[in-house]
Image: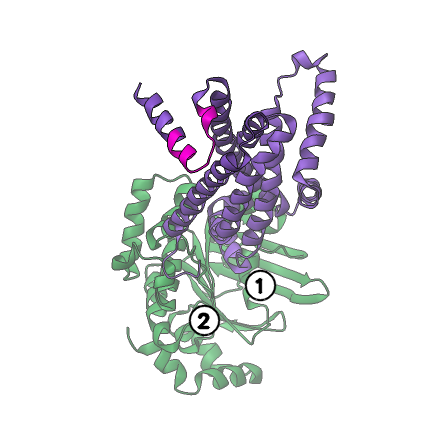
Amino acid sequence: MQDMNLTGLFIDLMGRLGLNYEFLATGYEAQIWRDGFITTLYLVAVTIPVSLIVGLIFAACLTSGRLWLSAPVRGFVELTRNTPTLVQLMFSFLVLNTVVSNMLGGAQNNPLSPFFWVVAVVGLHVAALHAEAIRGGIEAVPSSMIEAARGMGFSQFEILRYVQIPLAFRASLPAIVNGLISLVKSTTVGNAIAVSEITYASIMVWTQRDNVVELMIVLLAFFSLINFVVARVGSWVERRLAIPGYGL
Amino acid sequence: MTASTATETGAAIVKLEDVHLSFGQTEVLKGIDLTINKGDAVSIIGPSGSGKSTILRCINALVTPQSGKITVAGTRVDQLTKESERIQLRKRVGIVFQQYNLFPHLTVLDNIVLAPTKILGADRTATVKLARELLEKVRLSEKADAYPGQLSGGQQQRVAIARALAMKPELVLFDEVTSALDPETVGEVLWVIRDLIRDGMTSILVTHEMRFAEEISDTVVFTENGRIVDHGSPQQIFHTTDNPRIRQFVGGLSGGGRGAVRDGEGI
């Protein structure tokens, strides 16, 4: 087969450079590794929108002026910003997940997978960072502009929806992109609770094959590529949303 | 024609009775009585901090006085308790501010179309047509697709007026709309307002443009220290008043050539 020949060629070529990629020719380990890439991409693709949507909701709560909305979010933001993501993940999986299992009468009834907990913990952690950035943007909208909108009959929510968020999103976009880049890297914490993303899969392979350097090269290139794409998309959006004649 | 004559309640569109308002310890309005009839143009003049802008904000329910009665187009504004009721009132009363406050992320056309379509639920096609007519009226048809940041102050203020008119308000409040403009562009904004008043739009203006106030007003109101010191026809306030304070204020502001230059040229 064409595919096998290409793989064989690659293994042979790398072998001449002293790099051992022989596991690619095996069925089992190559499969684990390929699935690891897909799981990481899947994690990133799900967690990014979760972080953005929750971040927006958090920012709206923080700036609502209603204590029952802002106080719990403020507490959560402080907690999640100031503690390690890995600890949060372990706490969520080992404590919260167990509580859920007990409530549902056993782990076999618990629909929440380790994958879910990575999305939830990393997504909410980055959402807290987004929220702070967006909050800054919302509060930077001049009060005279808000009064003008009120004077026209906009409700508080409509001002948020049509005036504050469009302006705040533009102002906070560089910070949001930074948050997303850190999100991509943070998905690797999944390996602590056996989510078979690419670092977990790589560890599985290199403990058998002793080819850490070879897999590291690919790992680093892989994450660099994802974040290169994230940064490029970010600057594309920034250019698209640029307001002519305005500072943002 | 004249303000504060309580007998003409039939045609009154705005009526303030003994309105008192304080911000914290500061008493801003100390008993304002004012009646404005439909179709009238009323100018409120007076020194800074005399409560002029606060009167406008009371009429539009942007601030709520501690006591007194405010009736606007049949609504007892002082009795509104819910924000949703105040919003209903604001949709009927246009207000234009000193700082234009256009939405910088929207084109001129979208600035005008946003509120009628999103807030009033008006049909977009019809609203775009109306917006283009209004832009024609304020002589900015060619700027429909420009962003506010690309316009001069005078142009932005004319868009702000068109934006207020797109809500089809029953009256329009102008809060020192030319104060932030450079002298050369004041004229183009006043031209638009003059046109609007000639069309019969009920207008209340807080202004420092004395020549303009004299020219377009049916009634001029002079405020100082939270009270209405006097009101009457432009002739009365600007020329025949016995009140030394008003004579001093009016003379000090419009005596020089500045008013004439700002008002007259470029129109």
A187 is within the stretch colored magenta: no
**x, y percent for residue B126:** 30, 42
Chain identifier, colour purple: A
Q: Is residue A19 left or right of residue A124?
A: left
**x, y percent for residue B104:** 42, 56
As shown in the figure, which amino acid type bears the numbered disc 1?
A: Thr
Q: Is label 1 in contact with label 2 (beta carbons under 8 Å)?
A: no
Chain identifier, colour green: B
Indicate whether A6 appears above or below B249. above
Residue interval drawn in magenta: A12-24
> B69 or A62, which lies in front?
A62
Q: Which chain carries label 2?
A: B
Indicate whether B118 appears above or below A210. below
Q: Mark 1 lies on which chain?
A: B
User: Dot 1: within a 10 Å radius of its alpha carbon, few (fewer than 14), some, or many (20 or more) residues?
Assistant: many
Q: What residue sits 55% from the left and 49% below the top?
A: A134
- Of the two numbered discs 1 and 2 on the same chain, state the one appearing first in sequence: 1
**x, y percent for residue B9:** 51, 55
User: Dot 2: within a 10 Å radius of its alpha carbon, few (fewer than 14), some, or many (20 or more) residues?
Assistant: some
> B44 or A90, which lies in front?
A90
Residue B54 shows which numbered tag? 1
